[in-house]
Image (spheres, rainbow, N blue to C red):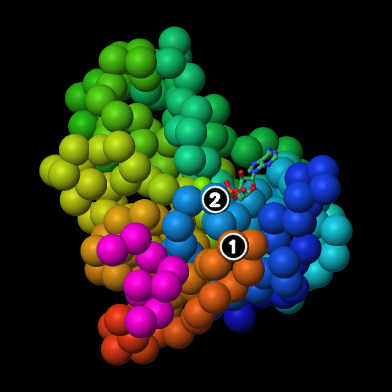
């Protein structure tokens, strides 16, 4: 198991927004985390990153206990995060946005299979090469999403946490973002994907976790979920 999240309890003030939440990702896998709005999907990713602190529970990454790691240490150990609000730098050029993703300092893995360079990013995202010096703000929503993904890849993650990457995108861009996630996964990066588009999620993931309010409602393979319309009706928008 690459990532093993067990029994997380996370609070915002008095509000108990994760109750014994568990999720796991194997090396090389794409796993989908699904559920209606407000269930706690984003909070699960933020808890893994260390952006919010769980009160109890454990997070293991490659066998190492990272439960109380601050975000920079979580990134350093090989977990990349693409937040729901894409947060690209609107006044920086495409290439400068990518360079912001480079992680410096001792301990960052800058070799091996998951070593990303600007040229390699351009191979996967050709539009960026054509628009290297254009400001982020001038990109379309889908292009900004891809820039946010590309920037995170520049940190050479082994696991990507991606929050609602197709939200608000035109259908053709939804497809492009889907395809790029598939391609990135093929390079050896595992992905924990929060996604509201069930079709997109099911076309990428082999295993799914469905959240009810604050807790895990169902987990199984794609085939197991396909066989359970009752579960889909209970936990997903239909
Ligand atoms: N910063 C915050 N402060 C207080 N409550 C929050 C905060 N962020 C999210 N929540 C609440 O926590 C719950 C889970 O939110 P979230 O993890 O964003 O859900 P999801 O991503 O599944 O839509 C919701 O009830 C939401 O209103
Ligand atoms: Mg969310």
Which residue bears the numbered disc 2? 38
Q: Which residue is mark 1?
A: 213
Q: Is residue 100 above or below residue 227?
A: above
Disc 1 packing (10 Å; few <14; some 14–19; many ≥20): some
Q: Residue 106 in the image: x percent, y percent?
A: 76, 44
Report whether residue 110 is seen.
Answer: yes
The quarter holding residue 194 reads: bottom left
Classify mark 2 as within 8 Å of ligand 1 or not, answering yes or no: yes
Magenta segment, which residues?
Answer: 230-238
The residue sitting at the top extreme is 91
Residue 157 visible here: no
Upstream in sequence: badge 2 or badge 1: 2
Instruction: Classify residue 140 as left or right of residue 44.
Output: left
Disc 1 C-beta below 8 A from ligand 1: yes
Q: Are marks 2 and 1 in contact (CB under 8 Å)?
A: yes
The residue sitting at 27% across, 48% down in the picture is 177
141 relative to 93 in the view: left or right: left
Residue drawn at x 67%, y 69% is 21
Magenta segment's dominant SS is helix
């Amino acid at each position: 198991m690459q990532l093993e999240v067990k029994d997380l309890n996370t609070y915002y003030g008095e509000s108990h927004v994760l109750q014994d939440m568990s999720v796991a990702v194997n090396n090389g896998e794409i796993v989908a985390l699904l559920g209606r709005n407000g269930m706690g999907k984003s909070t699960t990713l933020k808890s893994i990153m260390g952006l919010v602190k769980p009160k109890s529970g454990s997070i293991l990454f490659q066998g190492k206990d990272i439960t109380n790691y601050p975000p920079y240490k979580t990134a350093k150990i090989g977990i990349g995060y693409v937040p729901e609000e894409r947060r690209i730098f609107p006044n920086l050029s495409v290439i400068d946005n990518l360079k912001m993703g480079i992680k410096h300092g001792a301990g960052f893995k800058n070799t091996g299979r998951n070593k990303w360079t600007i040229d390699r990013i351009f191979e996967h995202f050709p539009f960026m090469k054509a628009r290297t010096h254009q400001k982020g703000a001038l990109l379309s929503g889908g292009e900004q999403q891809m820039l946010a993904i590309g920037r995170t890849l520049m940190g050479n993650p082994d696991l990507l946490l991606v929050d609602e990457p197709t939200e608000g995108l035109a259908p053709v861009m939804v497809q492009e973002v889907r395809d790029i996630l598939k391609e990135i996964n093929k390079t050896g990066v595992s992905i924990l994907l929060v996604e509201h588009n069930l079709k997109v999620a099911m076309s990428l993931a082999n295993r799914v976790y469905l959240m009810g309010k604050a807790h895990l409602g169902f987990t199984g393979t794609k085939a197991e979920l396909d066989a359970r319309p009752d579960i889909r009706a209970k936990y997903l928008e239909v």
